[in-house]
Image: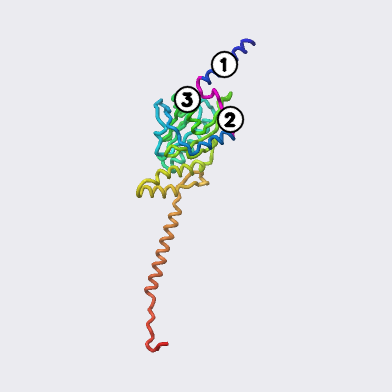
Amino acid sequence: MRLLLLLGLLLGFGVAYALEEGGQAASPIKLSSESALKFSESVVGQQVADYTLLDRNGKPFRISDYRGKPLLVSFIYTSCSEVCPATTQYLAKAVKYMQSALGADSFAVLTVGFNAPWDSPMTMRDFAKRQNIKLPNWEFASADAATMKSFTRNLGFSYEYSVAGFNHISLLTLIDQNGKIYGQVYGDSFELPSLGEPLKKMVGNVETQYPGWEGLRNRIRLFCTVYDPKTKTYVSDYSFFVGMFISVVMIYFFAAWLIRAWRNAPKRSPNPNQGPQ
């Protein structure tokens, strides 16, 4: 009995020491849905600092490398066996739909392992492989504990250590082309328009600024990219412009008919026998 008690104390001390050394969960915040939501909303509009992270191959990169196009950031921890994989799979489905609608190069995705230092480049690479994520412009990243602590707070991501791992808010942060937080999407799963509509606006803020015909073409394409509740995907619907074109053609032919009829109408000649009134 004493041996078991001693072993339990040693294990408890070891966990506390590891958490303190890792720096991620040594001082966890008290997490509630209300406080987590309030905190995540408070960072909208703020600039994201230029952090240095590591990609899945251990190569360093900076957040500023993503400037010029929208960036979606999600947080996971690799030892999570249920929620994080399910959330990532659902996000993959949404990203695939939006890449199909807006273009694979129109935005980027970054999944970050927040449990530093255990979420390393190797474990992030393994997580991506296990989730079979092969979509373009999607990276899996990690960082040292100090950087991760600052990065998660900058993006409004809340978490706390628990016996089962971590309790954390399910959050997808939308960052615009200038590196500012544009909005947040919540939940392990979400309705596609909650991501699609703000993403369309962010992509539009970039692609409609192109000069000449390219900018006009992008404006029309984005305007005609709409959510179809039947298929629950975004589709291209040019019916507005088709209807407008048909209306213009009909007005043109009707106006031409009126002009022709007026020109061909017999002219009334004055009556020579009619005197002045």
Q: SS at mark 1?
A: helix
| C-alpha separation, residue under disc 2 versus residue under disc 3 | 20 Å
Kindly report the secondary structure that dominates the magenta region of the rendered protein: loop
Q: Residue furthest top?
A: 2
Q: Residue 264 at what x, y percent from top left?
A: 37, 74
Q: Earlier in the sequence, mark 3 or mark 1?
A: 1
Give the residue drawn at x 39%, y 76%: 265
Give the residue drawn at x 50%, y 41%: 195
Q: Do labels 3 and 1 touch, CB within 8 Å? A: no
Q: Residue 17 at what x, y percent from top left?
A: 54, 18
Q: Name the image quarter holding residue 190.
A: top right
Q: Earlier in the sequence, mark 2 or mark 1?
A: 1
Amino acid at the residue labelled 1: Phe
The quarter of the rendered structure image containing the C terminus is bottom left
Q: SS at mark 2?
A: loop
In this rendered view, identify the residue nearer to me: 2 or 189.
Answer: 2
Amino acid at the residue labelled 3: Ala
Q: Earlier in the sequence, mark 2 or mark 3?
A: 2
Residue interval drawn in magenta: 21-33
Amino acid at the residue labelled 2: Leu
**Is 24 inside the magenta-drawn segment?**
yes
Assess disc 1: are there few (<14), some (14-19) or many (≥20) residues with their C-alpha within 10 Å of its C-alpha. few
Q: Residue 142 at what x, y percent from top left?
A: 45, 27
Nearer the observer: mark 2 or 3; the answer is: 3
| C-alpha separation, residue under disc 3 versus residue under disc 1 | 22 Å
Give the residue drawn at x 50%, y 25%: 115
The quarter of the rendered structure image containing the N terminus is top right
Which residue has dot 3 on it?
146
Which residue has dot 2 on it?
31
Which residue has dot 1 on it?
13
Determine whether, in the image, residue 241 is placed left or right of residue 34.
left
Q: Do labels 2 and 1 touch, CB within 8 Å? A: no
